[in-house]
Amino acid sequence: MTRTATTVWLDGRLLDDDQLHVHALTHALHYGSSVFEGIRVYPTPDGPSIFRLREHVDRLIAGAAAYGMELAYDAQGLLDAIVETVRASGRSAAYVRPLAFFGGETVRLNPGRECPVHVMIGVLPFDGLFAGGVATITATISPFMKTPSRALPSTVKAGGHYTNSIRALADAQNRGFGETILLNDRGEVAEGSGENIFVVRDGVLITNDAEADILPGITRASVLALARDAGITSRVRPLTLEDLQQAEEAFFTGTAAEVVPISRIDDTHWAQEGPITERLRTTYHAVVRGERAAPGPWLTPVGTQ
Ligand code: PMP
């Protein structure tokens, strides 16, 4: 048996590396016709637990439907398969990557009936982007526009959509920034390459929504719920460049990044993490690790068998 750090389940079976093959004409490899998720497993007092698994599975299923992909698994089937794969990995801190994709052996564009739909679940070791302490990140406004939803639906986490993020992030990192911020076709702030963005202005927490052509993140929704519980006033409305420049605080949210304070956006600098960011970051950090009660059933213990 050959198994690398990643545990992989494909179409119902846990596979060793030497059994893991996909056809070179896989439709998704050529055209990006896949939908995926990024999910975290955290060590908690109840053992390894998956954060907001149901919400991730629901988003995956909605994304598959948007691309006419018929999955062989319903929500419960996917939930069970993810739990099984995480358990098989033996990991208590991991990143889970479910992916549904069109396979097949055709170069025709419409996968239609010719391409089978495959489902893959990968469990990778992951301890967070900033394991070992608070980190801040710098960002720049991207010269690349966020693809408008009337071209590619922003609420769908599809493989092909990410060529936009890949180009924007590479540009930012080549210019020495840690992250990029894409504007939509109206010139409003959309989001980072793989994170949503929040600002604090006049003490009010502000973020945008799907109207701004963002992926409405599950971390974003969690942070909004935690803010409400903490009595922090929040508004969901379009964000402008002026909001970024005038903000007292700014931060990104995402499954991999959690809550990350932004220290600089081009010529706007913040000397230190602001108090609202710090409160939300530490609360989120404690909730995902089961050290503090969540406002709902957010953690699925993996259990042992
Ligand atoms: N926007 C984009 C483009 C993303 O890829 C992600 C990561 N999934 C997010 C926002 C944040 O979403 P979530 O909080 O669900 O990870």
Image: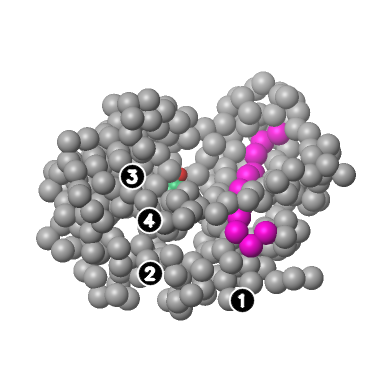
Q: Which residues are magenta?
A: 91-103
Q: Looking at the figure, which quarter contains the C terminus?
A: bottom right
Residue at the disc numbered 1:
46
Contact (Cβ within 8 Å) of mark 3 with mark 4: no
Instruction: Say which label, 2 or 3, has the lower sequence index.
Output: 3
Q: Amino acid at mark 2?
A: Thr
Q: Nearer the viewer, mark 4 or mark 2?
A: 4
Which secondary structure lies at badge 2?
Answer: helix
- Which quadrant holds residue 159? top right
Which secondary structure lies at badge 1?
Answer: loop
Residue at the disc numbered 2:
283
Q: Amino acid at mark 1?
A: Asp
Residue at the disc numbered 4:
134
Above or below, 1 relative to 50 = above
Rounded to the nearest whole Å, what is the CA distance between mark 1 and mark 4? Answer: 25 Å
Magenta: predominant secondary structure element? Answer: strand
Which secondary structure lies at badge 4?
Answer: loop
Rounded to the nearest whole Å, what is the CA distance between mark 3 and mark 4? Answer: 10 Å
Q: Amino acid at mark 3?
A: Ile
Residue at the disc numbered 3:
137
Rounded to the nearest whole Å, what is the CA distance between mark 3 and mark 1? Answer: 32 Å
